[in-house]
Image (tube, rainbow, N blue to C red):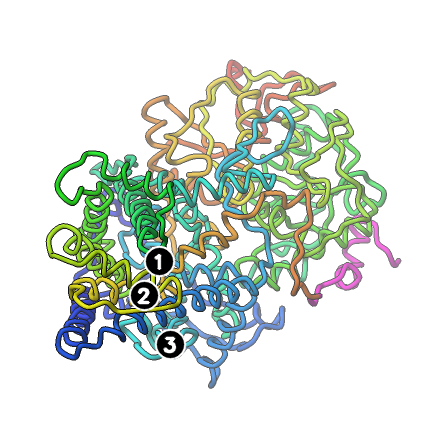
Amino acid sequence: MGLLFSFFTVVALVLMVLIGVKAAHLHYLFGVIIPYMAFLAFIAGIVYRVVQWGRIPVPFRIPTTAGQEKSLPWIKQNKIDNPSTSLGVIIRMALEVLLFRSLFRNTRTELRDGPKISYGSTKWLWAAGLAFHWTFLIILMRHFRLFLDPVPLPIAIMESLDGFFQVGAPVLYLTDLIFLGAVTFLFLRRVIIPQVRYISLAADFFPLFLIGAIGTSGVLMRYFLKTDVVGIKELTIGLATFSPTVPQGIGTIFYVHLFLVSALFVYIPMSKLMHLAGVFLSPTRNLANTNRAVMHVNPWNYPVKVHTYAEYEDDFREKMKAAGLPVEKE
Amino acid sequence: MANPKPEELAKIDLTPHKTGWMETPTVFKKGMFCYGNKPKSLETVGFPNVRSWSVLDEDWKLPENWQEIFIEGLRERVDKYRSFRLFLDICVRCGACADKCHYFIGSGDPKNMPVLRAELLRSVYRKYCTTSGRVMGKIAGARELTVDVLKEIWYYAYQCSECRRCSLFCPYGIDTAEITILARELLNLLGLNIDWVAGPVAACWKTGNHLGLQPHTIKDTFDMFVDDIETYTGIRVNPTFNRKGAEILFVVPSGSMFADPGTYTLMGELLLFHELGLDYTWSTFASEGGDFGFFTSNEMAKRLHNKIYEEARRLKVKWIMGGECGHMWRVWHQYHNTWFGPTDYLEEPVSPITGTKFENTKSNKTVHICEFTADLIKNGKLNLDPSRNDDLVVTYHDSCNTSRGMGILEEPRYIINSVCKNFHEMPPQTIKEQTFCCGSGSGLNASENIELRLRGGLPRANAVKHVAQKYGVNMLACICAIDRAALPPLMDYWVPGVRVTGVHEMVANALVCKGEKKRTVNLRGEPLPGMEGE
């Protein structure tokens, strides 16, 4: 159900553009107003969510320790997976965010007769996840050429590296291929692996379809359908400089692409895609394991009702005396 | 109830059923859940909804406004714990955690996949705490909190041992333990605990320990240990209790006072400290290092463990040492300092034998006995004869809590390798930070849920079986009281012939003491290797 619902939602989004632009000629709405509003919703939404999380206390220091702790000086500490310093935490987080270190640990459990259980290393999810996220980032950064004039050198260099193989005209970007391949893989594993299919919600399929559609529309626009690149840049620069204009003759496919990106912008803050910010706040990863060396303060720590020693002794005094145990009150 | 044969139990299908999980009703299966709490247990600690109820009853006798209580409790907690809110918000359901849970591997029940266990509560959170869930309902993964949903949350919150193995593999560090802990806390607002947790909590409140051992009983128990040690070693140790002015307060899980093989660990500690001439005291009041309150609510955990610091203060000790126990050390390490600090009335711990400063615990002043002993051995303070453990081929089970909630991995290994000659590790995916739970953690070591325990313990047992077949391992060492209670039946079922020991039992057997008689038997009264005829 979630799969079909998500698929048709994305189809509906595309239809909306076709109707809105092709039939109703709402170029300004789809080219300027919606992108602005979506971008605003994106920024405001992200800020809102991060502030909301940030305002919630971290009552306890609960890192998941994934290696030897700092203890006696002659015992070798795992300074990254069980960090005791800020530097260690920064490295742990950097490896987590940039290289998906936890996912790299992934294993596949196999149960055979006997019973015999084995745990093979499996890197597919890690590799596809890494490929997806990194190419997404590079593609996003490549798009800055549309908003900046002249195009900054780093972006130009990145582009030329991305088109290193000089295949086709316009030049084929490697990242486009990898990106669409990775999205497809992530989708297929969600459908094919029974456990993953079982846990999947509409909220898992929808972003895959949406991002897949964004990638596809981008690829169509660049390689297959004719679009007016000069016109597009005029529009995007206009957006970036807050003097929006809508040139005539930009293909509808551009508006499809732009609208889907706008939809993604709006969707991110209200969805699981907030993991992009949440990962930085995860208390099992971003805290040093210094619990016994440094006191961690819980802002809402409060006194609790306890059973005191005096009450205990009152309950058992005679028995304690008979057993020769010292007591406070004879 | 007879257990199925191992080969029967091991027929596990990890493929989920066809119907979606929200449409698949949860059937309570005997052997997979614990009895509900008795009214008396709740009453003792002032918990709500005191009444007599039974899990299999249709009517759980919930308060009239139970939904409101649960949902208000949920809203309160997502604003108090960043971990909780974040973990409910950002899961992408990538499935990396799915086959990391010992209960899933052993049962194949899809709702035991950590991600789905969390979704059970997450779906309720979406419905009542998020706009999309409120508006879009099921398509947004949200669902109403009905009695059946509540029962389902209860069933699976008590099929999670809070071992944190899933959190190790999660790309965002989502910790199901955190979700289970707070789910149980919410359930306790409605008086829905299990008796195996609520009973010990009530006992601990009154007597200071889960087993309800009263002060004179503790004294009597130790008298027996003292006699046994004298019989086996010729040395009469003289432990003190509630003694003011001792340098160190020593606290162990009460399980070690009560049942084999934990008792041998305690005897080992008695012998070691006597040999060192350590100025330490036991306490009949602070007579429990473990904290089943932690399996109830954070407040209850704090209420129970206040005694340790109150006692340390009353007895004017310098610092506190803790024995071999798993969740005890999760609580001591990650929670004590926050609950009870600053502990300025104590001193920064220094080993009186070696002069070593335990810098890593300078604020909280609690030393793990393995840190203490490893330091002794490193400094050559113990006269050890590892050949006394020559009959043992040992492997070591990391307890979940000490590995993933602390990181004490090398100290016990160093000790074991110093006191015995035959040590073999289990496969790397089953030890250290990747260790598997014994299947009975977080208060699930009851008897009525034995099938759950045997299933959950399968991954651990299977790894032991591997080294038993490969190296002839016959002894499973551990530093956890629940392990020492839970692993022996687990081994008998899956890997007959492998026994279980605490690390300090092996230390004491290898320890050559001043003035000992010729040692012919170990602390279990069994002949030492080469002494069978004596």
Residue B252: where, in percent of width, then height?
64, 44
- Could you give the CA–CA distance between mark 2 and mark 1, rounded to whole angstroms? 8 Å
Judge whether A185 appears above or below B129 on screen. above
Depth check, front residue: A160 or B165? A160
- Could you give the CA–CA distance between mark 1 and mark 3, rounded to whole angstroms? 23 Å
Magenta stretch in the rendered image: A303-330
Residue B223: where, in percent of width, then height?
70, 40
Residue density around tag 3, few if under 14, some if 14–19, many if 20 or more, within 10 Å: many
Question: Answer yes or no: do the residues labelled 2 and 3 have beta carbons within 8 Å?
Answer: no
Question: Answer yes or no: do the residues labelled 2 and 1 have beta carbons within 8 Å?
Answer: yes
- Identify the residue shown where x is 66% and y is 52%: A296
Pointer 2 and pointer 3 on the same chain: yes
The residue singled out by tag 2 in the image is: B28
**Residue type at tag 1:** Met
Q: Which mark is residue B32?
A: 1
Residue B455: where, in percent of width, then height?
33, 48
Looking at the rendered image, the disc whose residue lies closer to the viewer, 2 or 3, is 3
**Residue type at tag 3:** Leu
Q: Which mark is residue A282?
A: none
Residue B307: image quadrant is bottom right
Numbered disc 1: what chain? B
- Could you give the CA–CA distance between mark 2 and mark 3, rounded to whole angstroms? 18 Å
Asked if one can make out residue B455 in the rendered structure from this viewpoint, the answer is no
